[in-house]
């Protein structure tokens, strides 16, 4: 398949390129074009020599046209975070740039657009949402942040083009994504692992819904070329975890003498990911659990402390032990 991707230098994009560069089950390969800025750091992508890089950005219409020309599918991951001098610039680059990208995709006769949105589009939650009626993809969108408003606006443009039969669209709404980033210190939980690895005390609070980078990339590959995903929105979520408990797990995993203090977070709003679970072909492809989190923590620790016994691979025995011992800390949302 001929695939164009924006946001390829970020967490999702870098992992997705790796996955899409592997031959498909039928032996076929993907032709990938990726949009990158002239000053982008792409050292981690040099392994993938067959990727065709287009220099430009969301504010550069010519580069957007070049990106989608001849492509069958567009995966829009990019979100311009700055440095924006004003909110106007932040909105203009992301919203207007995404509109220009979708317009270019229409002109190029792209067949499918996959847009990476976010659960930040919700903002205000209806009182009817609860354990027996979790927040699902049909819940009204009322963003309370600028980021959520931008993502909501782009979703609306996607549906506008789809309803005018320009191309098929699929929207993915992940919660907080965890995984090893190309820029390691920006990885989720890096600071906690770093501090505890050097035996500092840490103070943590709150709780968060998480989804692994592997689950996100699997979801993207499942919707690509999938007619059943046309016009659909999918929530991507593995489960919910308290950061205090997570900190204690990290402390044990890295054999830290540092203390973990803080307060337990709230359970948060119940969310449904049933549509995404239905997309998986087998239970093994559904949301990962504590083992996946521990493997990420172990990879970060191996990067921080290379002298640690091991070969750079996750300590699977320890990860399995934590999966069995601590599994109750992650509340799976399957079926909700």
Image (tube, rainbow, N blue to C red):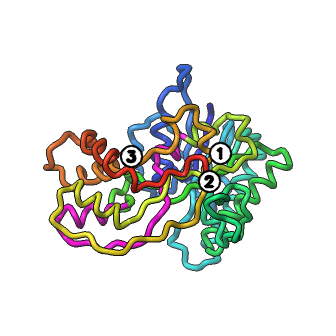
Q: Characterize the local packing of mark 2: few (<14), some (14-19) or many (20 or more) Cα atoms within 10 angstroms.
A: many
**For the residue labelled by badge 1, is the local secondary structure a helix, a strand or a loop?**
helix
Mark 3, residue position: 292
Q: Position of residue 93 (x, y in %)?
A: 63, 66
Q: Are marks 1 and 2 in contact (CB under 8 Å)?
A: yes
- Is residue 92 something one can see in this rendering? no
Q: Where is mark 1, residue-wise?
A: 275
Along the line of sight, which residue is nearer the eye, 164 or 307? 307
Where does the N terminus fall, quadrant-wise? Answer: top right
Residue 167 part of the magenta segment: no
Q: Is residue 266 visible?
A: yes
202 part of magenta stretch: yes
**Magenta segment range?**
189-218
Q: Which residue is mark 2?
A: 272
The disc, 3 or 1, on the residue closer to the chain's N-terminal end is 1
Residues 142 and 85: in front is 142
């Amino acid at each position: 398949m001929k695939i164009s991707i924006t946001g390829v230098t970020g967490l999702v994009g870098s992992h997705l390129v790796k996955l899409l560069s592997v031959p498909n089950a039928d032996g076929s390969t993907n032709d990938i074009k990726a949009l990158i800025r002239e000053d982008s750091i792409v050292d981690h992508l040099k392994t993938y020599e067959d990727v065709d890089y287009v220099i430009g950005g969301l504010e550069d219409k010519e580069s957007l046209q070049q990106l989608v020309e001849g492509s069958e599918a567009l995966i829009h991951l990019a979100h311009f975070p700055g440095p924006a001098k004003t909110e106007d610039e932040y909105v203009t680059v992301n919203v207007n740039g995404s509109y220009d990208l979708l317009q270019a995709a229409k002109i190029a006769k792209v067949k499918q657009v996959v847009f990476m949105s976010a659960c930040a589009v919700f903002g205000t939650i209806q009182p009817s949402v609860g354990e027996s009626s979790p927040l699902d993809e049909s819940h009204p969108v009322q963003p309370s942040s600028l980021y959520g408003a931008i993502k909501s606006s782009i979703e609306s443009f996607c549906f506008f083009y789809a309803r005018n039969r320009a191309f098929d669209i699929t929207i993915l709404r992940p919660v907080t994504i965890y995984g090893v980033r190309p820029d390691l210190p920006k990885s989720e939980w890096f600071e906690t692992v770093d501090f505890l690895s050097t035996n500092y005390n840490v103070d943590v609070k709150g709780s968060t819904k998480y989804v692994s980078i592997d689950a996100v990339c699997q979801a993207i590959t499942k919707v690509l070329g999938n007619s059943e995903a046309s016009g659909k929105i999918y929530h991507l979520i593995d489960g919910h975890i308290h950061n205090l408990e997570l900190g204690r797990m990290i402390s044990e995993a890295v054999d830290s003498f540092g203390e973990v203090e803080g307060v337990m977070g709230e359970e948060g709003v119940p969310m449904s990911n049933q549509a995404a679970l239905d997309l998986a072909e087998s239970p093994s492809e559904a949301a990962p659990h504590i083992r996946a989190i521990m493997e990420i923590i172990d990879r970060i620790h191996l990067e921080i402390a290379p002298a640690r016994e091991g070969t750079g691979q996750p300590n699977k025995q320890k990860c399995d032990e934590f999966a069995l011992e601590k599994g109750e800390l992650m509340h799976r949302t399957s079926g909700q």
